[in-house]
Image (cartoon, rainbow, N blue to C red):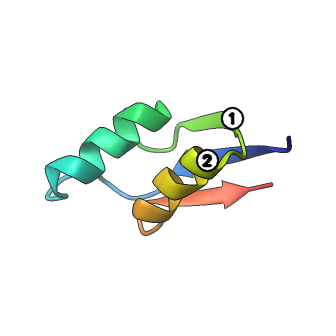
């Protein structure tokens, strides 16, 4: 499968707990961090849930 790069671009402060947990599951613990993941449906669903906090490159 293809890989995607996910970068956290907005702060997690004042976000609901489930969105914070989603960021943790993606491996994003600090602002401006970039992680690579396989483009599986589970990962894409997590990215969709926090799309207002992250940017995605293919």
Q: Residues within 10 Å of mark 2 (few under 14, many from 20)?
A: many
Residue 51 is left or right of residue 13, and the answer is: right
* Quarter placement of the N terminus: top right
Q: Which quarter of the picture shows residue 40?
A: top right
Most foreground residue, 11 or 52: 52
Label 1's element? strand
* Quarter placement of the C terminus: bottom right
Residue 35 image point, x, y percent: 62, 34
Residue at 69%, 35% (x, y): give it. 36
Q: Are marks 1 and 2 in contact (CB under 8 Å)?
A: yes
Most foreground residue, 50 or 8: 50
Label 2's element? strand
Q: Is residue 54 visible?
A: yes
Residue at the outermost right position: 1
Residue 28 image point, x, y percent: 44, 36
Q: Measure how far apart labels 1 and 2 are at the Cα level.
A: 6 Å
Residue 16 image point, x, y percent: 16, 57
Residue 19 is left or right of residue 4, and the answer is: left
Which numbered marker is on residue 36? 1
Residue at 72%, 46% (x, y): give it. 39
Residue at 14%, 58% (x, y): give it. 14
**Residue at image mark 2:** 6
């Amino acid at each position: 499968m293809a890989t995607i790069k996910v970068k956290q671009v907005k702060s997690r402060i004042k976000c609901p707990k489930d969105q914070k947990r989603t960021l943790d599951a993606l491996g994003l613990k600090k602002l401006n961090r970039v992680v690579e993941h396989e483009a599986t449906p589970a990962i894409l669903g997590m990215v969709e849930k926090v799309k207002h906090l992250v940017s995605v490159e293919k």
